[in-house]
Image (cartoon, rainbow, N blue to C red):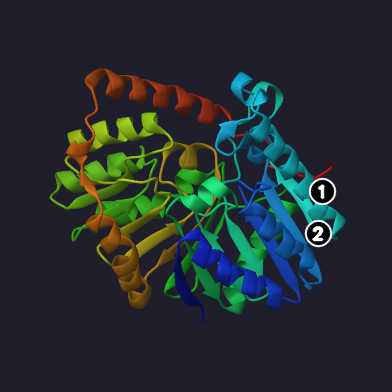
């Protein structure tokens, strides 16, 4: 039996997770794509360092070596920004401090020469503390904590065991794809190589939907938009909730142009939202690290849960969907000019080719060495 709890907002999530880390005695595993040495990341590092668990390990994607505060640290403007450089130094120091405190610290998926493997990220967000686990979309950085997001807390020995084994396989440099049915909860891990097959059951749920589909994602793209367009074409209501203040405006413009052609209902949240979820027929709630975009299919390692627990689904509708709709603007609040939509779509096509090229990049983890 797995007990599920929806934690809305990074602060609510971290208050709960910090307690579980403090109580853990056997294992504390922490994994994120972004883990920065700032006001959000350092308390997490301190909790890992202070934990009394016998086995403490941290996985950080190599993305965090090259992107700090949502900025590419090697860009000329970044090199001339003393605050950004200081945060980069603080981040490197924080990794060393966790290692010095006895935690195993490894970086996943080096980017390769000339960043040729940059698309092949480990995109998972995971905490395991004894028999409690967390998954969802929250990374450990100030800008991520400022975005609207949520995590799912899972309490149960079997779910925690499966997620711990997933962490351990990645830590050993041997990630694997798997799925496990735990009744009202299905856990899905994707290895970045066979993701098209792994996403198949989710696309099948979209194709079977009749009552309605609500999608929350800042970066939704094909092949999911294609499946959603098919659903809309057969009369299934499709509603998309996505941020107006998107940190990737080119992706937003391409998405809005696609949604207009496909006939989706679109609502724009005024602030940046990092929410990623899909509710199908009010029966299947899909949450986790995936943004439901092409890079999730082409190259990234992802961790998701398919939830059919009625109480959790109702809680999600009441605390996530309802407030998002109340404060949202109609799609017409942002006009996508034809040239902008065309340019955005072209840029995504180029990005697809890059992501597909990186699909077979080595999936490994290397020790932090400063």
> With 152 as the anchor, is 88 left or right in this view?
right
Q: Which label lies toward us, 1 or 2? A: 1
User: x, y percentage for residue 39?
Assistant: 63, 53
**Quadrant containing the C terminus in the rendered view:** top right
User: x, y percentage for residue 64?
Assistant: 65, 40
Q: Secondary structure at mark 2?
A: loop
Location of mark 1 (residue): 96
> With 327 as the anchor, is 62 left or right in this view?
right
The answer to which image quadrant residue 82 occupies is: top right
Q: Residues within 10 Å of mark 2 (few under 14, many from 20)?
A: many
Q: Height in image: 50 above or below 258?
A: below
Q: Out of 13 and 173, give the one closest to the viewer.
A: 13
Q: Secondary structure at mark 1?
A: helix
Location of mark 2 (residue): 103
Which circle's residue, 1 or 2, is located before the other in the chain? 1
User: x, y percentage for residue 244?
Assistant: 32, 40
């Amino acid at each position: 039996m797995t007990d599920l709890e929806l934690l809305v907002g990074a602060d609510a999530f971290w208050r709960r997770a910090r307690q579980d880390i403090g109580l853990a005695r056997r294992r504390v595993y922490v994994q994120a794509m972004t883990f920065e040495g700032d006001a959000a990341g350092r308390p997490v590092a301190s909790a890992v360092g202070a934990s009394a668990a016998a086995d403490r390990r941290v996985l950080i994607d190599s993305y965090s070596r090259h992107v700090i505060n949502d900025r590419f640290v090697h860009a000329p403007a970044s090199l001339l920004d003393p605050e950004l450089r200081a945060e980069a130094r603080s981040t490197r120091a924080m990794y060393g401090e966790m290692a010095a405190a006895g935690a195993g610290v490894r970086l996943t998926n080096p980017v390769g020469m000339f960043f040729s493997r940059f698309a092949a990220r480990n995109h998972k967000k995971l905490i395991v503390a004894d028999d409690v686990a967390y998954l969802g979309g929250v990374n450990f950085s100030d800008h991520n904590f400022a975005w609207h997001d949520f995590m799912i807390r899972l309490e149960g020995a079997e779910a925690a065991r499966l997620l711990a084994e997933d962490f351990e396989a990645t830590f050993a440099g041997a990630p694997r794809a798997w799925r496990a049915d735990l009744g009202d909860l299905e856990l899905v891990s994707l290895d970045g190589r066979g993701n098209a097959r792994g996403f198949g059951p989710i696309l099948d749920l979209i194709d079977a939907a009749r009552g309605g589909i609500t999608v929350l994602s800042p970066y939704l793209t094909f092949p999911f938009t294609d499946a959603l367009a098919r659903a809309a074409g057969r009369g299934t209501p499709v509603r998309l909730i996505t941020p107006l203040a998107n940190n990737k405006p080119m992706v937003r413009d391409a998405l809005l142009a696609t949604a207009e052609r496909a006939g989706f209902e679109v609502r724009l949240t005024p602030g940046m939202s990092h929410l990623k979820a899909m509710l199908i027929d009010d029966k299947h709630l899909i949450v986790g690290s995936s943004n439901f975009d092409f890079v999730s299919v082409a190259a990234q390692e992802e961790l998701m849960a398919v939830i059919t627990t009625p109480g959790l689904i109702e809680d999600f509708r009441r605390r996530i969907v309802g407030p998002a709709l109340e404060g949202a603007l109609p799609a017409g609040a942002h006009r996508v000019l034809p040239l902008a939509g065309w340019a955005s779509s072209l840029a995504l096509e180029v990005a697809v080719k890059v992501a597909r090229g990186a699909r077979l990049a080595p999936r490994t983890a290397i020790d932090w060495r400063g």
